């Protein structure tokens, strides 16, 4: 994770690398596509929650 100051807030970046082994290597492109979509949805949900000002659940 990296954090950088930007106008109006902070930009957080996340970097990951997937290296499937064995038979999963054939599914690598599909796993990458699914992973990118899932990650984008997760970060968008976090951004929306933080920007909403709603209290965090305990």
Image (cartoon, grey):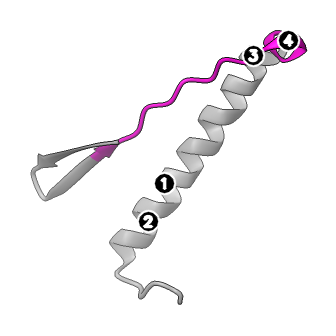
Label 1 and label 4: CA atoms lie apart by 32 Å
Q: Position of residue 11 (x, y in %)?
A: 25, 47
Q: Position of residue 23 (x, y in %)?
A: 90, 13
Question: Which residue range is magenta in the image?
Answer: 12-26
Label 3 packing within 10 angstroms: few (<14), some (14-19), many (20+)? some
Q: Which residue is mark 2?
A: 48
Q: Quadrant of the N terminus?
A: top left
Who comes first in sequence, dot 3 or dot 4? 4
Secondary structure beneath disc 1?
Answer: helix
Discs 1, 2 touching: Cβ within 8 Å: yes
- Label 2 secondary element: helix
Q: Position of residue 6 (x, y in %)?
A: 12, 48
Q: Nearer the viewer, mark 4 or mark 2?
A: 4
Q: CA distance from mark 3 to mark 1?
A: 24 Å
Distance in Å between CA atoms under marks 3 and 4: 10 Å
Label drawn at residue 28:
3
Cα separation, mark 3 vs mark 2, equals 30 Å
Residue in view at x 41 percent, y 60 percent: 47
Relative vertical location of residue 56 with respect to residue 1 in this rendering, above or below: below
Numbered circle sitting on residue 12: none
Q: CA distance from mark 4 to mark 2?
A: 38 Å
Residue lying at 34% horizontally and 81% vertically, measured from the top left: 53
Instruction: Confirm or deny contact between disc 4 and disc 2 (CB under 8 A).
Output: no
Q: Is residue 42 above or below residue 1?
A: below
Q: Position of residue 54 (x, y in %)?
A: 41, 85
Q: What residue is pinned by disc 1?
A: 44
Q: Is residue 23 left or right of residue 45?
A: right
> Residue drawn at (54%, 24%), measured in percent from left and top?
17
């Amino acid at each position: 994770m990296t954090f950088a100051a930007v106008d109006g807030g902070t930009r957080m970046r996340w970097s990951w690398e997937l290296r499937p082994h064995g038979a999963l290597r054939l599914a690598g492109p599909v796993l990458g596509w699914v992973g990118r979509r899932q990650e984008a949805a997760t970060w968008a949900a976090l951004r929306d929650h933080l920007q909403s000002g709603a209290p965090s659940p305990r």
